[in-house]
Image (cartoon, rainbow, N blue to C red):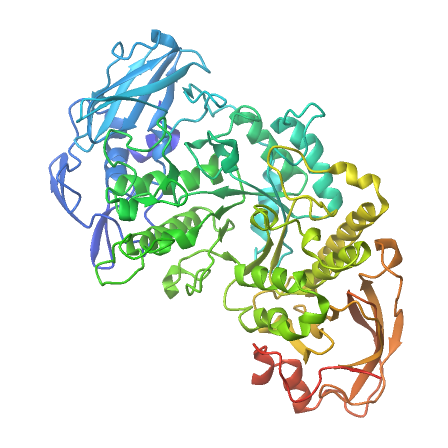
């Protein structure tokens, strides 16, 4: 049964639109139009009455057989030309009424395809499928089925071998180690998150607070016997916790079906199916729905960079390279043991684009964190000389992947302008989070991997060595506004021998906790949205172990309870402080006060909101108390310390500044300054409480430049630790 959208669409003819002097078949009315600026995979078409032939789409073409369902003929054409963003609506298993379902799969290199399952005793020859397009779509209709019946496609390739394959478009799978697809209907769930989407429509995503709690569903918390929580139980336990802690979003490691627990979900076999480890698809819908009703956004990891070689999955789907590049120099990631999608193949592009939109539309997720983008962009990624093939211009860029990513983001934002498309991109590729119209990749966020690596290295150093590595602390400000950054402390940084976040910190037991508080205080003040992996908020000492829940028993100890209380307090302070998130991606929201006091490992800067309100941030990364430490301030008046990571309630030493009046003593180019006490390993936030009359109401021009406000000097943070004068002075 085809959707109401398609039924409406059939009333209108196809349109031909010219894009970049090339032609593409537009979607029928009611289906999503091809976004302007997308370069289609196939670019020249000739109409032949009711049929169609193509130039540039391979020898098979896309002429329909007499058997093709007329209501899906147009959709099939779009699919074979790489422009179908709704391929999941007709490929896979779909309900027709009563006990009847239609099955469709794409297997262009198959000699024959049959359907086997519970309904026919798994007889591989009992239910043959018909080839309904020359480009390889097969179809059959079966009655007598029940929901949750298991099935697979029996695909005989040109080599004469038969392969049992799960449905690439299947909505539900057996729980591993079994891997059959399951008959399942996605319709019927009644969503209750209309208010959430109404609020999203009223706000921009860039000048709102974004503080993400990243987690792995199977190891966040478990039952005492080691069994995992269901989606429903996770909603019961996780949602109140996230609300209490003050996070705005959860980011889930991949929930798409995967066979191997040790992959954490990054080796996907069921791209259209939430993993059955935790329940049925509608259970996951309910999880997302309840998150939204509680005011929590949901981001899921998405893996278009590679897929595993499991016999039941996409690998050699029809006996040939179908979803992957045929040349292993392009089609394999040897280190991961996985295959690379063929981004040039139209049907693969339709598969991936429609999959991204599927999760946004059918499961109401708010965004996708796109995994391993760098591995897609570079042909030589993790390959030695001779193991990769240059592009047509002799370069190392995968031009087909670049084109795919641009089309993907154009399609997503055409349909969901408030979606979050977050690139995990670890190189200096330019304009990752800029629109395709500007030459960018079209994402709206990028993980700041440089900041993450620099800061975790810096924090792991003995404090005595930090003065020799001051650039690790300051360099990220130099490029902080070149992209729309998310600052991540992710799962990858607390596993495989890297140690937990608190485990990276040097010094005594108390100093480790103080260092975590200082790091998180600095991170929250740094321009960019935030992400923290589960367990870091309360000081999980062990590395993350996907086979076990977090060590919640640590909360029986006061130091860990205080650290969680600190994280909670910091998160809520962040939510209440527009200066920390309204101007995350502009120099208008940041200026230096002092960046070059490398000998004492102290920095000081301002964060500024849309209305000019500001916070002054002072960071001390040594275990040394700095008394009478003087910093310049832009306004003469009374300043209040509004947050201090050393507060006794957080487990610190309790060295506080309270309220401080500025003095008419020049410092850092300003004509007034504050004298502060900096606790060891601490971060302070100060706010102007009351301005006082001053002989000079604003800083000198030199002061403005030193502070980074509109002058050119303020727009660049130094990459080096050296300087001609100290940034601060302990009097």
The residue that appears at 61% across and 62% down in the rendered structure is: 457
- Residue, far left: 48
- Above or below for 97 versus 416: above
Q: Is residue 661 above or below residue 553?
A: below
Relative height, residue 125 to residue 281 (above, below): above
Which quadrant of the structure image shows residue 110? top left
Quick check: 93 left or right of 42? Answer: right
Quadrant of the drawing holding the N terminus: top left
- Residue 696 locus on image (x, y percent): 77, 91
Percent position of residue 510, x then y: 82, 56
Q: Position of residue 693 (x, y in %)?
A: 84, 86
Q: Quadrant of the C terminus?
A: bottom right
Q: Is residue 607 visible?
A: no
Which residue is the extreme one toward the bottom? 695
- Residue 475, by quadrant, is bottom right
| Left or right of 30, for residue 712 | right
Which of the pair 680/134 is nearer the observer?
Answer: 680
Horizontal and vertical percent position of residue 451 = 57, 63
Identify the residue shown where x is 77% and y is 55%: 513
Residue in the foreground of this view, choosing between 118 and 159 = 159
Across the whole image, how many numbered discs are drawn on residues?
Answer: 0
Position of residue 558 relative to residue 269, above or below, is below
> As rendered, which of 212 and 28 lies closer to the eye?
212
Query: Residue 100, can we see it?
Result: yes
């Amino acid at each position: 049964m085809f959707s109401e959208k398609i039924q409406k669409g059939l009333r209108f003819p196809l349109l031909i639109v010219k894009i970049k002097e090339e032609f593409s078949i537009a979607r029928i009315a009611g289906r999503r139009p091809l976004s302007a600026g997308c370069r289609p995979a196939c670019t020249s078409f000739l109409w032949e009455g009711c049929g169609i032939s193509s130039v540039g789409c391979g020898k098979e073409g896309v002429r329909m057989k007499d058997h093709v369902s007329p209501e899906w003929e147009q959709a099939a054409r779009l699919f074979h030309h790489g422009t179908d963003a709704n391929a999941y609506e007709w490929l896979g298993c779909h309900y027709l009424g009563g006990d009847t379902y239609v099955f469709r799969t794409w297997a262009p290199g198959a000699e024959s395809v049959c359907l086997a399952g519970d309904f026919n005793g798994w007889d591989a020859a009992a239910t043959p499928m018909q080839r309904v397009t020359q480009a390889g779509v097969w179809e059959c209709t079966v009655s007598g089925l029940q929901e949750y019946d298991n099935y697979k496609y029996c695909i005989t390739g040109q080599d004469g071998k038969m392969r049992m394959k799960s449905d690439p478009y299947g909505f539900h799978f057996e729980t591993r180690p079994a891997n059959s697809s399951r008959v399942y209907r996605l319709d019927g769930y009644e969503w209750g998150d209309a208010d959430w989407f109404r609020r999203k429509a009223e706000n921009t995503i860039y000048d709102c607070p974004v503080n993400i709690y990243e987690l792995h569903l199977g190891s966040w918390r478990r039952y005492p016997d080691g069994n995992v929580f269901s989606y429903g139980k996770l909603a019961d336990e996780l949602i109140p916790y996230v609300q209490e802690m003050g996070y705005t979003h959860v980011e889930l490691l991949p929930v798409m079906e995967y066979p191997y627990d040790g992959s954490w979900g990054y080796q996907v076999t069921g791209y259209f199916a939430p993993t059955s480890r935790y329940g049925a698809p509608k259970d996951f819908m309910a999880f997302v729905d309840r998150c939204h009703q509680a005011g929590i956004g949901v981001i899921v990891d998405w893996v278009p960079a590679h897929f595993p070689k499991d016999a039941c999955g996409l690998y050699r789907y029809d006996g040939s390279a179908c979803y992957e590049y045929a040349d292993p120099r392009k089609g394999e990631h040897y280190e991961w043991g996985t295959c690379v999608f063929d981004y040039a193949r139209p049907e693969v592009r339709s598969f991936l684009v429609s999959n991204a939109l599927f999760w946004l539309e059918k499961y109401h997720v708010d965004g996708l964190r796109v995994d391993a983008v760098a591995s897609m962009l570079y042909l030589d990624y993790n390959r030695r000389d001779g193991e990769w093939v240059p592009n047509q211009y002799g370069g190392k860029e995968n031009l087909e992947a670049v084109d795919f990513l641009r089309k993907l983001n154009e399609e997503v934002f055409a349909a969901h302008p408030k979606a979050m498309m977050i690139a995990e991109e670890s190189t200096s590729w330019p304009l990752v989070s800029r629109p395709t119209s500007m030459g960018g990749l079209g994402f709206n966020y990028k993980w700041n991997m440089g900041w993450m690596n620099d800061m975790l290295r810096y924090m792991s150093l003995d404090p005595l060595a930090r003065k020799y590595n001051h650039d690790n602390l300051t360099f990220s400000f130099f490029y902080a506004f070149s992209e729309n950054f998310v600052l991540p402390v992710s799962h990858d940084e607390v596993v495989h021998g890297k140690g937990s976040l608190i485990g990276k910190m040097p010094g005594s037991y108390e100093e480790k906790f103080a260092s975590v508080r200082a790091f998180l205080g600095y991170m929250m003040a740094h321009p960019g949205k935030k992400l923290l992996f589960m367990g870091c908020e309360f000081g999980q000492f062990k590395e993350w172990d996907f086979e076990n829940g977090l060590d919640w028993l640590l909360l029986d100890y006061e130091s860990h309870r205080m650290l969680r209380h600190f994280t909670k307090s910091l998160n809520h302070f962040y939510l209440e402080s527009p200066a920390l998130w309204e101007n995350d991606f502009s120099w208008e929201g940041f200026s230096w006060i002092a960046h070059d006091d490398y000998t004492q490992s102290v920095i000081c800067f301002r964060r500024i909101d849309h209305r000019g309100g500001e916070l002054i941030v002072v960071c001390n990364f040594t275990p040394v108390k700095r008394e009478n430490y003087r910093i310049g301030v832009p306004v003469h008046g009374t300043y209040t310390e509004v947050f201090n990571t050393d507060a006794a309630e957080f487990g610190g030493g309790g060295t506080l500044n309270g309220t401080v009046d500025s003095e008419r003593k020049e410092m850092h180019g300003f004509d007034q300054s504050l004298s502060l006490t900096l606790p060891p390993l601490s971060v302070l936030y100060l706010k102007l409480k009351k301005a006082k009359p001053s002989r000079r109401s604003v800083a000198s021009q030199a002061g403005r430049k030193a502070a980074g406000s509109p002058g050119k000097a303020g727009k660049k943070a130094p990459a080096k630790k050296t300087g001609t004068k100290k940034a601060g002075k302990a009097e």
